[in-house]
Each structure stands twice: as structure tokens, then as C-alpha cells.
Image (spheres, grey):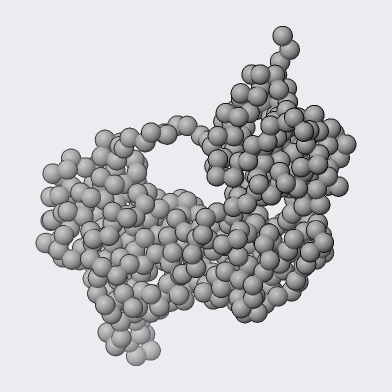
Amino acid sequence: MTDPQPCRVIGVLDDGAASLGDTAIAHLRRADLVIGGTRTLALFEDDIAPGAVRRDLTGQLSAVPEWIRSAREARQCSVVLATGDPLCHGIASYLASRLCIEAIEVLPNVSTLQLACARVGLAWQDAKIISIHAKDAGEWTQGAAPSHGLYALAQAVRQHDRLAVLTSPDNTPDRIARLLLAEGQGDDFHLAVAEHLCTANERVLADLSPQDAAQQRFADPNVVLLWRVRPRTNPVRFGLADAAFHQRQPDKGLITKQEVRAVSLARMQLRADSVVWDIGAGSGSVGLEAARLCPQGHVWAIEKNDGDFEIAGRNVHAFGISNHTLAHGKAPEGLQDWSDPDSVFIGGSGGELAELIALCLRRMKAGGWLVMNFVTLENLATATHALSSLNATWDVLQLQAARSKPILHMHRMAAENPVWIVCAQADAAMASKEHPFQGLELAPLPSGERLGEGLR
């Protein structure tokens, strides 16, 4: 018995059969099973064999692999229709991860993003491709969590000069423009919107400012191109001077001094994608430098004092970062909603230090570091006692810096207050958690090129 034929995943455009080559048309016309979104099936109705089974995947994406598997077992020819390149935020990788790679054959088409770039003459080899074709994410607000549907876009506009964005009926071009304005980047980018590509209703609006686009409405389906018109800044990532941060006035305070901050960040062993907790943020200095050091990660910060919370918020805005969430409250309230951390910094506890230490070590990912700063003997004793009672591995560093200050025509050394830096590492026993899908790598649900209404 011959092996079953692979399912052909065919990239299509909105001009229907005109977008397909002879091979793709032949596969479609002899298919026993054709799978696609509602609109796509209707678009190709004349090219589907009368006796072929049509299956609408809208709202039933998880069923598609089994449909294909059953068709192959019955030695039937099957086809999946998807917009553009099915391997660009499309269904092909999803199917390949749930079937064997030999079960599908991809016949790509021109991506709608590639078409949009061609319409405006924009080179796209360096463009960052982002898909926000998901459920309604809501409007972007500064400090939104990684779970927000526009989070990846907010990070990408900080790090790239050109972006190509797959939109959705809810996450629209005007919403993208308002994200840029909310992040203070309204003067940094221009955008183009390409609507109804390859149809009689095609319209391309080029060189829009975010201010103009934020007030308009655009026809769906569409894609968005963004390009930077003002050079990106290249800020210092580590070791900023204390004066770079807003602080209490007239008496400056509640800032982790530069020397202590540098050692504390070094002991946190940060990676590009680290999730960091900053508890008792004060002015926010440690968390803000951590956010710059972890561009693919996220910082969760909390501060209970009203005045310091306001100052930390001003620093967040001044730093121009999008991977930092600042909460107003008293830890541990609210920490249950935060992602498990790779590193935790405690600069203030509000009296719940022992409880916080236990919580942080319990939530911390294996191998993560808890770093705490203390200036009083009492808090130092509380911390070391709590760590010992938890059988944690810990160490203490006393750090005392002296800074030069002018005296007449000379300089003297003025000592800063000594600070104890207490560090503890989460071991596997403390941080172990049962994850039902641990070790299983599956492609995510496709979110890019259109498969039908409500899915790209």
C-alpha cells in the first residue's frame, strides 16, 4: 500500500485563483477535503470539486489536525487554504507540530506584508514582523503586563527601525497609532496601512503620522508598516549616576546608590529574558536598570508610599521602557498575579520581611537569585534568621563606599552609609512546580496570515 499523500497547505490571496500557480490549482481541484475559513472557502468555491468535503476551521482550529489525520488514513487528498505564506505566523507550523512533518506540504504565496512593502516601495529584509492578530487586546496603557495582546509590539518598536504588523478586526491600525502615542513615540514613527490587498477595493495609505492615524478608521483586512523617522536613542544600560533618577526633594533618598545598585544587579545574575521582581521600589532605580538589561524580559515593581510611587512613575516614563509594570501597594498583596521570577530584589518590606523571603524563594524559578539590601542590624538579623529557618543557601556582603567631595581647593573622602547585601539562591526543591506540558514543545496557535474570519 502506498504512503498517504501529504496535506497541501496552500497560501492564497484575495484575488482568488489568480493568485495560484498551476500546481496549487491542481491540488485544490482534485482534493477530497478542503479546509479553510468561511470567507476563504467562499472565495474558492468555483475551484473546489463538487463532491469534496468542505470544513470551516473558524473557531475549530484544534480539530484541524484530526481532520487531516483521518483524511490521510482514508487515502484522501486534503488541502488547507491560508492567506499568504502559511509559515509566516500562519497555520503550517501549528500543523507540523501536531502531525509529523511528512504529513504536510507547504505551497507558500506572497505574504500580505511583502505585498504591502511592494506597494509603498519599502525594503523589508530588515523589518521585524509582529502579529497582533489575536482576540481583542484592549487599548494599550503604559506598564501593561506581558499578557496584553499588544505587548510584543510595544517592545518591538523600542528595538527596531522597521516593523511589519499583521493586524486584526479589533487590534487595528488606529490602536497601533495610539500605542505609539502612549509610549511617547508619536514623533518617532510614520506608518502605512494597506487595506483589501489584491481586490477591487484595495487602498494603501502611506506616510501617515501616528497623530493622524489614531483618529481614523480603516477597512479590514489590512496590514501596517512602521518605519522610524527619528533615530533611536542608545541609552546607558548599567551603572547610571544617582542624579539620572528623580528623587525626593529637598532631601534625596530612597534610591539604591550607584555602587550598591551595581553590585546588587550583578548578584541578580540577569539574562536578556529574565523576569524580575522589585519589591519596595522606592525611586525605582534597580528595577529600571534591570528592565534595560532584560529587553526580552519583564520587571514587576511595587511601592507602598504615595510620594515614592509617584516619583518611581516619573522615572519609568523618563526611561522610555515598555517592559516594566509598577504597582501601588504593599507587598505581598498583588504578587500572586505576577509571573514567577528569575530574580528578586527587595529594597523595602513594610514589616513583612520574613513572609516575603519565604514567598519569593517559593515562587522563584530554580537557580534564581534573591538579593536584598539592608541598612539596619534588625532587618539584617530578620533576613538571615528567615533564610536559615528555610535551609536556604545565603551569603552577606557589607559594602561601604566613600565618594570624593571638594574642600576648599582640595578634596576629601566622604563615607556613605554601610549597606548589607544579602543574597540567596532558590534551589530545585524550593522552586519545583508541576507543569503538565513541561518538556513538550508545541508550535503556538497561528496568529499571522489570515485563515478566515477572526484568525490570521
Residue 97 placement (x, y as % from top left)? 58, 32
Depth check: give the residue in front, 20 or 356: 20
Q: Residue furthest top?
A: 1
Residue 328 placement (x, y as % from top left)? 29, 70
Q: Residue furthest front?
A: 50
Residue visible at 11% across and 61% down? 378
Depth check: give the residue in front, 86 or 347: 86
Residue visible at 43% across and 67% down? 143
Residue 1, visible in the rendered structure: yes
| Above or below, 252 relative to 139 | below
**In the rendered view, does 98 fall on the left or right side of 165?**
left
Number of callouts: 0
Task: State which quarter of the image contains the N terminus.
Answer: top right
Q: Residue furthest right?
A: 22
Tell me where residue 235 sits by quadrant: bottom right
Residue 259, visible in the rendered structure: no
**In the rendered view, does 201 fall on the left or right side of 282?**
right
Residue visible at 60% across and 65% down? 172
**In the rendered view, does 257 fall on the left or right side of 39?**
left
Residue 227 placement (x, y as % from top left)? 69, 67
Tell me where residue 45 sits by quadrant: top right
| Above or below, 216 relative to 446 | below
Depth check: give the residue in front, 44 or 374: 44
**In the rendered view, does 289 fall on the left or right side of 351?**
right
Residue visible at 20% across and 63% down? 349
